[in-house]
Amino acid sequence: MALSSRRASSSTPESNRGGMGLANVHQQRLPSEESDSLFRHVASPRTVSIIGAPMTHGQPFVGTDSGPSLLREQGLLQDLSTLGWRVEDLPDLDFSNICAQAGKANPSKHNNLNAKHSLEVGAGTKVLADLVESKLKLGRFPLILGGDHSIGIGSLAGILRARPETGVIWVDAHADLNIPLASESGNMHGMPLGLMMKGLIPDRSIIPGLEWLEKGSSPHLAPDSLVYVGLRDIDKAERNFIRQLGIKTFTMYDIDHLGIGRVMDLALEHLLKKNPDRPLHLSYDIDAVDPLHAPATGTAVRGGLTWREAHFVAEHVVKSGSLASAEIVEVNTTLSDGQGATETVELGHQLVNAMMGEAIL
């Protein structure tokens, strides 16, 4: 049933979508009735720190830097307040200056290791890591608005320095498990997990700009602390890494076969069985969703999550009570027409609300 519904949805002609525009839909913002038992890793009073991370250097398209401002313009701050959060809305990280200065200050360190713009990505993600770590240590919930998915380097580094036991749910069409020597493109938005995964790169300091990852606690993510949801476009090297490391993976085949409810039950069981109290991080790439619903993104792949499946993923993680941080990435309105861009931003906005406790009942 799930497969036939997906095919029908993905093949709906544009001309038959009259009335489906999100401007015609009204949705109330209501917190879960269980809100007092959710987000148990967040100190009281429950505070979300919104961190805009407008990174563009991890991939080749302009436009991902507009994600944070577009999501705020949808009324995000008011929605979070309605959902019961105290809101700390931080200024967007000044990546245009931070990254530009990094490239200019170290011209001799540009590398031939197939990690494009590593100086810029490294400088930006270091600042992000420090900020995320500091907010977690204050007991706040870091909500990170990207930006391309290379920001995951900084998000994960900060999270793992503050809470090394954190489990990660990575919702994406792609595995993002590449390393420079294996990457087919050299684009760093396809490398955050490869760079943070224990056992893949012995010394990350050989990559210009990422020397900071090997200093201090040198954060790494253990393979059994990661679960993928929604994969459907995986490079050959990534496929080998997933198998060799035994990473728990639910592709779109698994979602079609088992249903999204069973998949998310199994994902949470994998991460929480040994330690039911561990914190979880949800990293959500908008390209996990079928391009029928989210066309404005850089690496769209057909056959993705439906609108309801996309929401259920976030809602179910929240219901575990263990969600302690989240990010949404790769919204790029320059890559679709007006209606497609509008619907992608609105979907991103709704997914953030779902991550933060919005519920049907």
Image: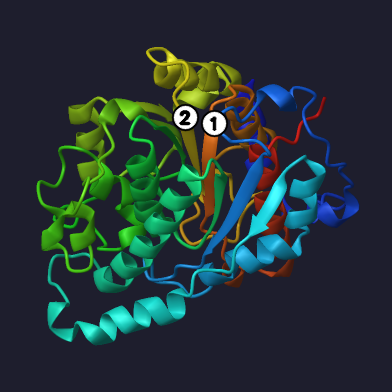
The residue at the point 70 percent across, 44 percent down is 353
Query: Helix or strand or loop: what does disc 2 sit on?
Result: loop
Query: What distance separates the C-alpha of mark 2 from that of mark 1?
Result: 7 Å
Q: Earlier in the sequence, mark 2 or mark 1?
A: 1
Q: Which residue is under mark 1?
A: 41
Answer above or below: position of 166 versus 59: above
Q: Dot 2 surroundings within 10 Å: few (below 14), some, or many (20 or more)?
A: many
Q: Which residue is under mark 2?
A: 279
Q: Farthest residue in the top direction?
A: 273
Query: Helix or strand or loop: what does disc 1 sit on?
Result: loop
The residue at the point 61 percent across, 30 percent down is 39
The residue at the point 18 percent across, 54 percent down is 215
Picture coordinates of residue 216 (x, y %)?
20, 50
Q: Is residue 303 visible?
A: no
Query: Hey, what amino acid is under mark 1?
Result: His
Picture coordinates of residue 160 (x, y %)?
34, 41
Quadrant position of the C terminus in the picture: top right
Residue 31 or residue 312, whichever sits in front: 31
Q: How many marks?
A: 2
Q: Are marks 2 and 1 in contact (CB under 8 Å)?
A: yes
Query: Hey, what amino acid is under mark 2?
Result: Pro
